[in-house]
Amino acid sequence: MHPVLVEVERSGFVESRHRGSVAALAVDGSPAVTVGSPDEPVFPRSANKPMQAVAMARSGLALEDELLALSSASHSGEDFHVEGARKILADAGLTPDALQCPPQWPLDLEVAVRTEKSRLRMNCSGKHAAMLATCVVNGWPTESYLHVDHPLQVAVRETVEELTGERVAATGVDGCGAPLFAVSLTGVARALRAIVTAEPGTPERRLADAMRAHPEWTSGTHRDERRLMAAVPGLLVKCGAEGVDAFALADGRAGAIKIDDGSMRARTPVTVATLRALGAEVPDELATVPLYGGDVIVGEIRAVGL
């Protein structure tokens, strides 16, 4: 059984606990923090997206700045995300009808109340638009771009294995319909470390620089990932469903976490605690999540044991 990483305390009483695993690497890439079973394979979910985006950039996808960041996004479905995905498609001579991600409501609640669910509002639409554009650049079929044996997905798998330094342990289907490759948390941390420490001008480094320069495009205006990247210079953070977070600092310190029960509320406190364990300075307001009783804060979600 993995150790408790998070306690949920209400009115002085711990009402819930979340267990999980953590892998964190020092500047030289050696293990620095190991909790639970970080070398067992997991589905990193959207924490795989930077690796997918690197594969697309290596395959000739010529995006820059905000649109390059959007190619690795789990975005909130805000209007600028939608317009960015639409532009990627239009520049490739495609329309939103080519998208094969499912229609969903925006993750941003303020947007959701005034709009409707659609493929463009789905949090992975930027990645799917970029995948389609990559197919157009290479003359690959667009109708089958999500098939695991499609040339694009073969390139993604090869890139995942190269960056993580591991063979893929299992293949599944992500929530957006794209192939999903299982690797260890240590491998994910190793991959993000490789992306941020790559030489300037390489596909890896261009992606890292775009994500860090435009964190609202990889997540959203009101998201924890954006707040963390704004608060910690040189930090890259990418979340994944089912309680996954992955990060890397500019000097090569990196980490990945997985909450066993898939709780998303537990991610950020553990990520902040891991960053602090590596010596990074993170503002106190990002370390815990407040709990409310009515309109009053009566407790918090906090990391323990790190």
Image (spheres, grey):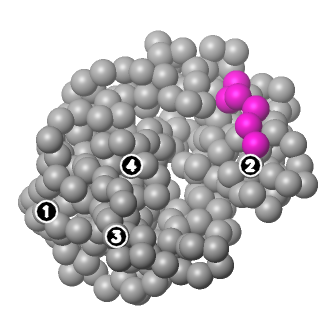
Asked if residue 63 lies in the magenta stretch, the reply is: no
Q: Secondary structure at mark 2?
A: loop
**With respect to residue 64, does 42 lie above or below?**
above
Distance (Cα) linking label 3 and label 1: 29 Å
**With respect to residue 59, does 143 lie above or below?**
above
**With respect to residue 139, does 105 lie above or below?**
below
N-terminal-most mark, 4 or 3 = 3
Q: How many marks?
A: 4
Q: Left or right: where does residue 268 sit relative to residue 152?
A: left
Residue at which label 2 appears: 106
Residue at which label 3 appears: 13
Which amino acid type corresponds to the residue marked 1 in the rendered image?
Val
Q: Secondary structure at mark 1?
A: strand
**What label sits on residue 244 in the rendered view?**
4
Residue at which label 1 appears: 33
Secondary structure of the magenta portion, mostly? Answer: loop
Q: Secondary structure at mark 3?
A: strand
Distance (Cα) linking label 2 and label 3: 34 Å
Distance (Cα) linking label 1 and label 2: 35 Å
Which amino acid type corresponds to the residue marked 4 in the rendered image?
Val
Q: Comparing marks 3 and 1, which lies closer to the viewer?
A: 3
Q: Left or right: where does residue 219 sit relative to residue 291?
A: right
The answer to whether mark 4 and mark 1 are in CB contact below 8 A is no
Q: Is residue 225 visible?
A: yes
Q: Residues within 10 Å of mark 3 (few under 14, many from 20)?
A: few
Residue numbers of the magenta segment: 100-105
Q: Left or right: where does residue 140 sit relative to residue 102?
A: left
